[in-house]
Amino acid sequence: MTLKKTLFSLFIALALLQSGTGIANSVAHSSSGTNSLVITMPDNDGPLVDYVRHTFAEISKRTGIPSHIKTLPKLRALVSANEGRFDGVGARIEGIENQFKNLRKVQVAIFREQHIVFAKHPSIVNNVKDLPSLIDHAGTNQYQVAYLLGSKKAEMELSPLAANLRITYQQPEKIFSLIAMNRLGAYVGGPAMSNRIILKEKFATSGIKEVAIASEFDLYPYLHKKHTRHIPSIEQALSSLVADGTLNRIRERLELGENE
């Protein structure tokens, strides 16, 4: 075989290999045919990830639409679903479709969420009663307030605070550690369920307290626009899960530390 033919054969083999890899990746992330919907969740949402996993397992039973949960960093979980690399997001605030144009909201809430203000310093604990008083107190006393990177709700809540007094981190454990060492003023944290469990299990003796409820709001699943046809079935299934108490039972089990 001549050198020219050998190089041509190698070129064809590499092209086929790359094509096969691309096809395999496409199938893994596709919900066409019998493949699962791949629903993203932030990898720092703790027990909320398990809650959404159990809830979507129930939705799959009631709709016949297979699904599974993929955890990613908080912002990437949202961006990847919007770009169509995955099929949707499991639990996000209302209105994100205004920024992430390819996502379509399931009109039935999957979870009732709270954002909680956590702090240790007595001045913050004694003077902060809600979100407006936190923003006023932090501005007056010039301490930083943390929230999780990729949390659009917390970003909006803290937007009245000066930029130099807002700081983001990837993991709640890091934030709690800094507050415990008196290197950070306060934390607006959600999901409340996840942060309460972390505080109880890992920082029980730190002196950090739950100071106030910053906000309370619903979270919704979103699907990429190519899967809009599935939304009515998922809405019907979620409504039935609310009506028969299944969602409350899933939440109660996780809050008690049960995850079966």
Image: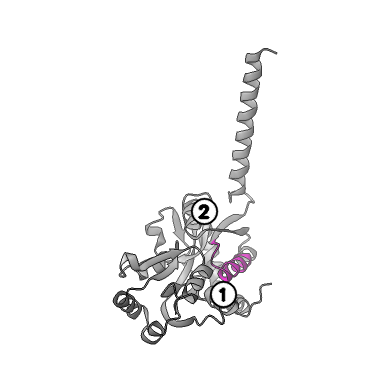
Q: Identify which amino acid the numbered label 1 is placed on.
A: Ile
Residue 40: x and y in percent read 54, 58
Q: Main secondary structure of the magenta part?
A: helix
Q: Closest to the observer: 260 or 123?
A: 123
Front residue (pair 41, 144): 144
Residue 181 percent across, percent down from the top left? 48, 75
Q: Amino acid at mark 2?
A: His
Task: Report whether 117 appears left or right of 73.
Answer: left
Where are the magenta residues, as a range?
42-58
Where is residue 71? Give x, y as percent.
57, 59
Q: CA distance from mark 1 to mark 2?
A: 35 Å
> According to the image, label 1 marks what residue?
198
Which residue is rendered at x = 62% and y = 39% of the image? 21
Closer to the camera in the image, 195 or 54: 195
For label 2, the crowd category at 10 Å Cα-Cα, with few meaning under 14, some 14 to 19 and many 20 or more, is some
Rendering coords of residue 230 (x, y %) = 53, 58
Q: Which residue is mark 2?
A: 227
**Image point (60%, 29%), residue name:** 15
Circle 1 SS class: helix
CB-based contact (under 8 Å), mark 1 and mark 2:
no
